């Protein structure tokens, strides 16, 4: 008889929305230091502020790794430039806003869960096939 599948990590279950604290309370997950994105030296001052704020949002679920360092730094610079524009009282270019939104979605800073369709049942289910086969 073959062994069953290995248990999944709590961060994987949390990202999928199936984490059960009663079952996964004792599990500890280690993040390897080399798996974290490394901060490049070409970040702007505003980009470094965003890096410090957002690196904690992407590391627990391993949404950004060492391979994503350049793209995450680019995201930080764009958001930092947008913040400087807003502080100066001007509106940043729409292209910067859209690109920052797309990149934030890729890194899981916000995204799928914020766009779930809320049905007429008060948000209890978002399954479009929940009534399949049900007759009145």
Image (cartoon, helix red, strand yellow):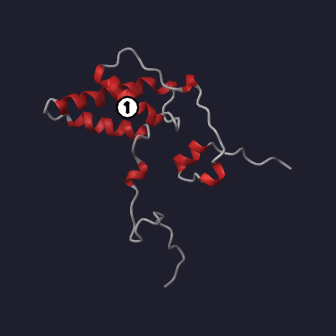
- 134 lies above or below 23: below
- Quarter of the figure with residue 26: top right
Q: Is residue 59 above or below residue 133?
A: above
Q: Residue at x 32, y 40 (%)?
A: 101
Q: Residue 52 is drawn in which quadrant?
A: top left
Q: Residue at x 31, y 35 (%)?
A: 99
The residue lying toward the viewer, choosing from 18 and 4, is: 18
In the rendering, at what x and y percent does residue 55 appear? Answer: 43, 30
Up/down of 41 relative to 17, above or below: above
Q: Residue furthest left?
A: 89
Q: Quadrant of residue 46?
A: top left
Q: Residue at x 54, y 47 (%)?
A: 14
How many dots with numbers? 1
Task: From the top left corner, tell me how far across and down residue 135 is, in percent.
Answer: 51, 82
Q: Residue furthest bottom?
A: 136
Residue 90 on image: x %, y %: 13, 33
Place of residue 39 in the rendered image (x, y in percent of width and height, measured from the top left):
43, 20
On the rendered structure, is 102 left or right of 20?
left
Q: Is residue 115 left or right of residue 25?
A: left
Residue under the image location 19 percent in, 30 percent down: 85
Q: Is residue 58 above or below residue 132?
A: above
Tag 1 secondary structure: helix
- Rate crowding at label 1 as few (under 14), some (14 to 19) or many (20 or more) other CA atoms within 10 Å: few
Instruction: Give the residue pinned by disc 1.
Output: 53
Q: Is residue 9 left or right of residue 127?
A: right
The residue most toward the top is 41
């Amino acid at each position: 008889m073959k062994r069953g599948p290995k248990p999944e990590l709590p961060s994987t279950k949390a990202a999928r929305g199936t984490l059960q604290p009663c079952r996964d309370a004792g599990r500890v997950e280690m993040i390897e230091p080399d798996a974290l994105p490394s901060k490049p030296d070409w970040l702007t001052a505003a980009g470094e502020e965003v890096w410090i704020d957002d690196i904690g949002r992407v590391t627990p679920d391993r949404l950004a790794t060492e391979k994503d360092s350049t793209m995450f730094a680019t995201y930080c610079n764009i958001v930092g430039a947008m913040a400087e524009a807003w502080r100066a009282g001007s509106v940043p270019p729409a292209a910067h806003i859209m690109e920052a939104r797309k990149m934030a979605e890729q890194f899981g800073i916000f995204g799928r869960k914020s766009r779930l369709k809320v049905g007429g049942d008060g948000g209890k289910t978002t399954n479009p096939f929940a009534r399949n086969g049900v007759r009145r």
